[in-house]
Each structure stands twice: as structure tokens, then as C-alpha cells.
Image: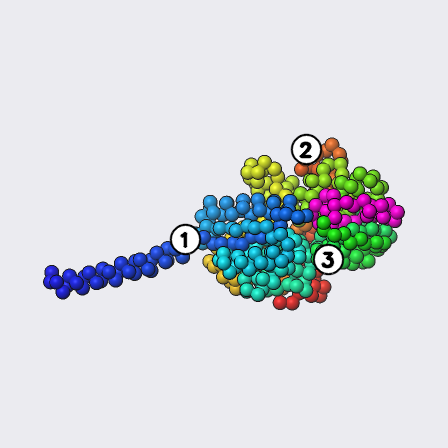
């Protein structure tokens, strides 16, 4: 071989080595880089106990997805933090998008914090799966193209319980005294409750606004004793509900208490013998559906306690997100929005499949009213709630309890 030929061969080899060093590893990195997801949920304050379950649920889904091969062959990497309050939630969401390189935002329970995260998502044109906040306003006048809502909204919760009250002759001509959490979610609940009462013959005699940091309900309970209503109704949230239930039982008030919002962790914290009445839930661990029972069994095996509804909802939300990314083969915001807006059906571990409405991005799914088992009938400390039949009924549209286009001011 001549020296000229040898030099040409060496140059060609060097060029090929350069391509290998610069090109192929970049392709490999692109295929193996983790998909980063920014997760925010309250871990402190009056919703902190619920956020703890939310983290357990999304982490369990992350583990299962990654052990099953990940998404598009890539592992998920969830950055999960305490949202703290609306201002902090917005700051953390912006940092996750700008500095942490997350593909999408997920989470939240506090409606006020969810609203600020929604604004960050819209400003950055990035996808936000809003999982646990229930304010009607979020999917109403404050809706935006980049946010999808998983949990049942205030209006559905009110309608689910309200229909049970009508059925049990606890509505027409009854006098209601309500206690309302003084923030966006509580205000929405109170508004929906008043609409239902007005439409079904109930009479609202008083509505007390309660700050979210209130722990002593005795001043309100004394007012209730003086007013002598037929029914007391809770529009509270988080550990407010727990405190109210315990103190209501201690006061021994004779008026039935019902609620348009109750998370099962708060019911468990109240303890058997304190809770009574009819309440709504989006899911419960005794639901007799095979896929739900399998999830519950795996959760108990992992955590030595049953999943609360925020563990369930975070779990199914990440599974829905993984399905969307796998089927679109993308983490691109516009492609994900288009996929969800097709009203794709998802397994929500319930009797019927769920789907997001394309015009307000609300997940349409079953809900449940529940009552309380007679004292001594519970199998364990988590078993004293008696789940009612799913609403809407099996022959009804999933949308019959939700606000219609005419009722909902959402415009994207």
C-alpha cells in the first residue's frame, strides 16, 4: 500500500470515528434519556395528608411503568415537590419547565394553587394534567387549552349527594345550614349547593365562611344549635372536615350532617362513630371491580394500608399520561392535547371507561355517594364507609351530572 493510500485510509477512519463519537451516541442518548415529569402536590397545611397519598400513588404507577419497559422505551423520572401555596406552586412549576427540563406538569389538590400552575402552563404552552383540584372555575371561566382535569368537579359532587338526599326525602322544604371553606373551591361548592337547593325545594338559612386554618369549630356549632336547622351541610376541605366531624360528634347536635366534599383520608382520621350522613367520593378501595381490587391489593402489600382516593387518582393519571405518550410516540404538548381531545377512553379502575371532554378538558367518569356503616360493623379502621351505587347509572350518559356547555363558561 502506498503512503498516499495509507493517508487516505487514515483520514477516512478518522472521519468515521468522528461520526461515531458525535452522531451515534447522540442517537442513543435520545433514545435512553429519561422522560422527566414535574409533579406538585401539597405535603403541608390542611391538605398535606391528601398530598402524602398522592405521592404514594404516582410513585407506585412510576415504578410499574418503568419495570414494564417505560414509555417509548424510556424510563420515567418524576420530580415531586410540596406545592406549599399558590405563589410557591407557580414558582416551582416555572422552574421545573425552565431548569429541570420536565416534559409535562402533573398534580395538585389545592384549587388556588392549581389555578396558578394552569397559568404557568398556558404562558409556557406546556401540558398540565391537573389531577386533584375540584373547583368548577378551573374547568369553567379559568379553563385553558393546556390543562386537563381528572378529579370530579364541585358541581358533580353536589349533584351526586343531592340526588341521594332527594331520594331519601331530605331535600324538599328542609332548612340547610352550611359551612364553607373560604377559598375558591369552597366558594364553588357553596354556589353549586345553593343552585341545587333552589332547584329541588331546599332552603338555605345560613352559610358561614370558614378560613382554611380554623381548627376550633365551637363558635359555628353554637350558632347551629341556636338556628336549629333540619340539616347541616359541609362545604369544607382537607382536615377541616375531620375537625368538624369530631367536634360535631362531641357537641351531640341532633341535626343530620351531610357534605358535598369529603376525602376518605379525612373520614378515616375522623374515626368510626363520629362520621354520619351522606357524602360523595370519586373512588373507594372497596369498589368491586377486578382491576381496582388488584390495585388495592398491590398498594396494601407495598404500604400496609389501603389507598385513599388521592393515591388512586394519581396512579391512574400517570397511567393515562403514559398511554398517551406511548400511542402518540411523543411528549410534544400539541400531540398530547390532540390525543386527549379525541375523547380517547381510559381504564380508570371503575366499572366504565373514562374520557376527557374535548371542549372543557374534564374527565367524564363515575362517582359514588357513600354513607356510614352501623357502629361495630366495620372489619377494620378503614372499613366503616358504605359505598353506594355508581352515578350516573349504568344506562345514563357519564355527562348527566356535569355542567353542560350552556352552563359552563369555558372558552378556549
Per the rendered image, the range of residues in magenta is 214-243
Q: How many marks?
A: 3
**Residue density around tag 3, few if under 14, some if 14–19, many if 20 or more, within 10 Å:** many
Of 398 and 226, nearer the camera is: 226
The secondary structure type at the circle numbered 2 is loop
Sequence-earlier tag: 3 or 1: 1
Q: Is residue 220 visible?
A: yes
Q: Is residue 356 left or right of residue 256?
A: left
Of 407 and 133, nearer the camera is: 133
Q: Is residue 312 visible?
A: no
Find the distance from the CA under tag 2 to the CA under tag 3. 36 Å
Sequence-earlier tag: 2 or 1: 1
**Which residue is denoted by mark 3 in the rendering?**
188
Mark 2 and 3 residues: CB-CB less than 8 Å, in contact?
no
Residue furthest to the left in view is 2
**Which residue is denoted by mark 2 in the rendering?**
379
**Which residue is denoted by mark 1 in the rendering?**
32
Q: Is residue 305 above or below residue 182?
A: above
Quarter of image, res 272: top right
Of badges 2 and 3, nearer the viewer stands 3
Q: Is residue 242 left or right of residue 365?
A: right
Residue at 72% x, 43% y is: 242
Find the distance from the CA under tag 2 to the CA under tag 1. 47 Å
Is 234 contained in the magenta span?
A: yes
Of badges 2 and 1, nearer the viewer stands 1
Amino acid at each position: 500500500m502506498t503512503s498516499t493510500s495509507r493517508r487516505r485510509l487514515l483520514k477516512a477512519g478518522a472521519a468515521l470515528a468522528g461520526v461515531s463519537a458525535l452522531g451515534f451516541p447522540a442517537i442513543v442518548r435520545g433514545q435512553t434519556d429519561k422522560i422527566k415529569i414535574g409533579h406538585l402536590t401539597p405535603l403541608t397545611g390542611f391538605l398535606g395528608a391528601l398530598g402524602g397519598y398522592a405521592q404514594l400513588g404516582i410513585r407506585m404507577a412510576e415504578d410499574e411503568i418503568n419495570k414494564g419497559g417505560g414509555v417509548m422505551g424510556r424510563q420515567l423520572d418524576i420530580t415531586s415537590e410540596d406545592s406549599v401555596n399558590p405563589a410557591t406552586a407557580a414558582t416551582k412549576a416555572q422552574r421545573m419547565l425552565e431548569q429541570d427540563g420536565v416534559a409535562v406538569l402533573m398534580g395538585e389538590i389545592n384549587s388556588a394553587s392549581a389555578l396558578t400552575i394552569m397559568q404557568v402552563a398556558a404562558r409556557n404552552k406546556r401540558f398540565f394534567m391537573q389531577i386533584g383540584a375540584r373547583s368548577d372555575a378551573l374547568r369553567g371561566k379559568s379553563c385553558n387549552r393546556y390543562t386537563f382535569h381528572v378529579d370530579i368537579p364541585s358541581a358533580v359532587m353536589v349533584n351526586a349527594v343531592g340526588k341521594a338526599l332527594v331520594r331519601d326525602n331530605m331535600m324538599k322544604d328542609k332548612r340547610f345550614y352550611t359551612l364553607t371553606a373560604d377559598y375558591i373551591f369552597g366558594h364553588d361548592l357553596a354556589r353549586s349547593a345553593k343552585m341545587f337547593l333552589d332547584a329541588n325545594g331546599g332552603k338555605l338559612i345560613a352559610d358561614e365562611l370558614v378560613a382554611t386554618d380554623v381548627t376550633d369549630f365551637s363558635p359555628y356549632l353554637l350558632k347551629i344549635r341556636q338556628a336549629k336547622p333540619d340539616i347541616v351541610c359541609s362545604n369544607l376541605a382537607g382536615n377541616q372536615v375531620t375537625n368538624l366531624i369530631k367536634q360535631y360528634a362531641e357537641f351531640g347536635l341532633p341535626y343530620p350532617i351531610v357534605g358535598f366534599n369529603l376525602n376518605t383520608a379525612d373520614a378515616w382520621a375522623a374515626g368510626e362513630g363520629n362520621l354520619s350522613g351522606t357524602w360523595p367520593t370519586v373512588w373507594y378501595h372497596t369498589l368491586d371491580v377486578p382491576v381496582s381490587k388488584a390495585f388495592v391489593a398491590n398498594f396494601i402489600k407495598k404500604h400496609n394500608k389501603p389507598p385513599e382516593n388521592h393515591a388512586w387518582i394519581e396512579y391512574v393519571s400517570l397511567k393515562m399520561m403514559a398511554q398517551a405518550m406511548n400511542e402518540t410516540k411523543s411528549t410534544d404538548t400539541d400531540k398530547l392535547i390532540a390525543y386527549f381531545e379525541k375523547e380517547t377512553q381510559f381504564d380508570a379502575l371503575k366499572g366504565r371507561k373514562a374520557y376527557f371532554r374535548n371542549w372543557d378538558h374534564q374527565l367524564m367518569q363515575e362517582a359514588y355517594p357513600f354513607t356510614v356503616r352501623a357502629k361495630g360493623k366495620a372489619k377494620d379502621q378503614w372499613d366503616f364507609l358504605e359505598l353506594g351505587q355508581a352515578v350516573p347509572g349504568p344506562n345514563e350518559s357519564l355527562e348527566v351530572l356535569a355542567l353542560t356547555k350552556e352552563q359552563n363558561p369555558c372558552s378556549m
